[in-house]
Image (cartoon, grey):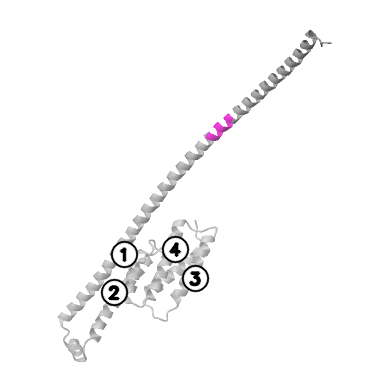
Amino acid sequence: MASSRLEINFIRLLSRCESIAAEKRGETEWRLEKYVGALEDMLVALRKTPSKPTPEVLTDYTRKVDFLKGILDAEKLSSTTEKALANQLLAPGRTPTIANERTPASKTVHMQTKARCTEEMRNELLGTDASGTGNANQDLRNRRGTPLDERQTATELDAVLQHHHLLQEKLAEDMLHLARNLKNNTMAAQNIIKQDNQTLGHSMRQADVNFDKLKTESERLEQHTKKAVNWFLWIMLFLVSFTFISMILFIRIFPRLR
């Protein structure tokens, strides 16, 4: 299926946004945020068009737009550590945006942003060590550049990175645990609902059987009542007739005494 004009414009703007995100931007850079907002509007319009892409392509487009939004949100964080953690949790796109890309641009942007965050953390640690020392010691370190301080700084940086890595693993384990609990609870709820549906179906079938039996018994009772009433009428009629005839015979046989 040929791409629509809206989809072509969306792909061009998405590629442009990925190129801007790959660059090191200043605080006054405003284009990326505006472009991402325009991408969201175009993505909404793209879902409503008759010639919209396949659901898999739309899912990948949404993933890339959410990735760019995540980068913008991560850059607004104040702490370097929070920025690094937020960038680690981002999910880039899985397919290239344009045909001539060997590696998806969003993955490249993800690696570059993680590298920039690591560099900022390293610079922050080095800057903290330098500001916490006296002027004389700072000049002495600048002149000598002792390997001990370098090893100490590298050890501290490795400890910080390892700490963040452990935090990420713990967060991933917690999310996996929550997902498993959610799955188990969902399966338990499905089983309960299934059992309730079976019980309800059995009750409805039993109610239908009881209703049929009640209807049959009602008809039989009605027929029996009609038969009983008919027999009663015939008996009463017979008794009245017999009494009448008996009275006539009695009068004829035994005349009135004078």
Relative to 230, is 198 above or below?
below
Density class for disc 4 (Cα within 10 Å; few <14, some 14-19, many ≥20) is some
- Magenta residue check for 213: yes
Above or below: residue 239 compared with residue 20: above
Q: Secondary structure at mark 2?
A: helix
Picture quadrant where residue 125 is located: bottom left
Q: Residue furthest top?
A: 253
Name the amino acid, label 3. Ala
Q: In the rendered structure, which disc, 3 or 2, sits on the residue that comes first in sequence?
A: 3
Query: What residue lies at 41% left-to-right and 65% top-to-bottom?
Result: 64
Q: Earlier in the sequence, mark 1 or mark 2?
A: 2
Single out the residue that lies furthest toward the front. 258
Do tag 4 and tag 1 residues touch (Cβ < 8 Å)? no
Residue that badge 4 annotates: 62
Q: In the rendering, which numbered label is found on residue 171?
A: 1
Depth check: 107 or 245 in front?
Answer: 245
Q: Looking at the image, is mark 3 or mark 2 nearer the viewer?
A: 2
Disc 2 marks a residue whose amino acid type is Thr
Return the disc, 4 or 2, that comes first in the chain's sequence. 4
Q: Amino acid at mark 1?
A: Leu
Mark 1, secondary structure of its residue: helix
Q: 116 or 218, which is in the foreground?
A: 218
Q: Which mark is residue 38?
A: 3
Q: CA distance from mark 4 to mark 2?
A: 27 Å
Q: Dot 4: what SS?
A: helix
**What's the mark number on residue 118?**
2
Assign a secondary structure to mark 3.
helix
Magenta segment:
210-217
Disc 3 + disc 2, Cβ < 8 Å: no
Q: CA distance from mark 3 to mark 2?
A: 30 Å
